[in-house]
Amino acid sequence: MNFFISDAMAEGAAAPQGGGLQMIIMMAIFFGIMYFMIIRPQQKRAKEHRELISSIGKGDEVVAAGGLVGKVVDLGDNLVEITVSENTTLKVQRQAIVSVLPKGTMKGL
């Protein structure tokens, strides 16, 4: 008897048409997008960093994660000893090295 709100008449529930196949296709597309936009670039950067760490040698000028710039004096399995000034040497982890600078960069600083 409500004049302003009409009564809702429910129809019989329609059977889902192709719901399972569409869901699988959508999940595959979503995974493909996630792989090419997130997972693959991250793996590529990790591979480049591993190659950078393994190519470090004595005399290379490097930048550590904290922004320290120094020249590699000694190499260990997990630690690298770098000279940041004439009488100052520091030990940093190999993984903390962010980049290798071109030769002679420290003289310009």
Image (tube, rainbow, N blue to C red):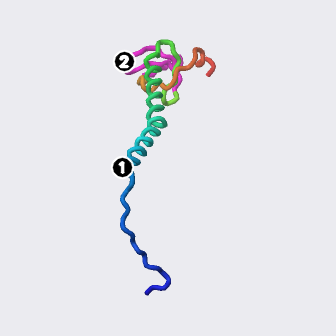
Residue in view at x 63 percent, y 19 percent: 108
Where does the image place residue 104, in percent across and percent down from the top left?
Answer: 60, 15
Task: Locate the C terminus by quadrant.
Answer: top right
Q: Which residue is mark 2?
A: 77
Task: Locate the N terminus by quadrant.
Answer: bottom left
User: Considering the numbered disc 2 on the image, is that residue within a helix, a strand or a loop?
Assistant: loop
Compared with 3, 17 (above or below) is: above
User: Considering the numbered disc 1 on the image, is that residue within a helix, a strand or a loop?
Assistant: helix
Where does the image place residue 31, in percent across and percent down from the top left?
Answer: 42, 40
Residue numbers of the magenta segment: 68-91
Quarter of the figure with residue 47? top left
Observer-nearest of 85 and 8:
8
Residue in view at x 38 percent, y 62 percent: 14
Q: Which residue is mark 1?
A: 20
Within 10 Å of disc 1 (Cα), the crowding (few <14, some 14-19, many 20+) is few
Q: Main secondary structure of the magenta part?
A: strand
* Residue at the extreme top of the image, as rendered: 58
Compared with 58, 19 (above or below) is: below
Magenta highlight on residue 4: no
Observer-nearest of 87 and 101:
101
Residue in view at x 41 percent, y 44 percent: 25
Magenta highlight on residue 71: yes
